[in-house]
Amino acid sequence: MKRLSGLFVIALLLSVPAAAQQKTVDGLVINLGLMPASLAVRAMGHAHAHPATFPSGSEHLLITLDDAKTHQRIGDATVIVQVRAPNGVVEEKPLLHTQAAGMADYSELFAFGASGTYRIRVKVTPAHGPKSVETVFRIEHQL
């Protein structure tokens, strides 16, 4: 039963995040997913990467990277995310190298304590790329 519920959480992480967006920037496909931290920390590949306890209102922010031409997953980049809350509070963190279902991704927990528009700036520095790329996502978050 534990294995089945773990597979369900992984499927949930991969297919139905609370918020999901995609942008292609300088040859990189950047996917952003957001879901409650309480669900995400139960998934294999993420359970050991994140703390078991976290502040109320925490969300699991997940980034996946793919090469736009080859569609190959990129798992060796440095990803830094800055989240600006509707009230102007800014939280910035380097994302952890994590994985779900054997696929590399990047994730971290962030406080989403209010309803409104969150501005999420993503900076990606590929390990073997010539330069960093940045993009901004906007998420409408409701408590």
Image (spheres, grey):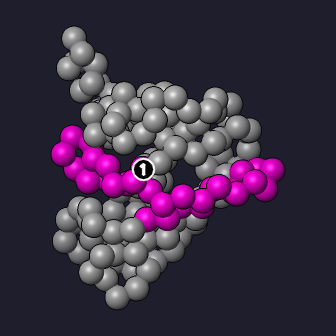
Q: Which residue is mark 1?
A: 107
Identified at 52% across, 44% down, the residue is: 109
Q: Name the residue: 67% across, 52% down.
A: 118
Number of numbered discs present? Answer: 1
Check the image and report above or below for 22 versus 7: below
Front residue (pair 116, 74): 74
- Asked whether, in this view, residue 25 is left or right of residue 67, the answer is right
Residue 7 position within the rendered picture, expressed as x and y whole percent measured from the top left: 24, 26
Q: Secondary structure at mark 1?
A: strand
* Residue 89 drawn at (x, y percent): 75, 54
Residue 20 x/y as whole percent: 47, 48
Instruction: Compare residues 73 and 76 and report the one nearer the observer.
Output: 76
Residue interval drawn in magenta: 79-107
Q: Residue at x 50, y 34 (%)?
A: 37
Residue 16 locus on image (x, y percent): 40, 36
Task: Relative to 28, say whether 92 is above or below.
Answer: above
Q: Amino acid at mark 1?
A: Ser
Most extreme residue toward the bottom is 130
Judged left or right of residue 94, residue 9 is left
Residue 74, quarter of the rendered image: bottom left
**Depicted 137 relative to depicted 33: above or below:** below
Please report the residue visible at 81 percent of the width from the left and 50 percent of the height from the top.
87
Considering every residue shown, the one lying at the far right of the view is 87
The answer to whether residue 137 of the structure is visible from this angle is no
Residue 111 location, quadrant: top right
Query: Magenta-highlighted stretch: main secondary structure?
Result: strand
Q: Is residue 57 visible?
A: yes
Tell me, yes or no, whether the highlighted magenta stretch contains residue 88: yes
| Above or below, comparing residue 130 to residue 33 in the picture | below
Q: In the picture provided, is 59 more to the left or to the right than 6?
A: right
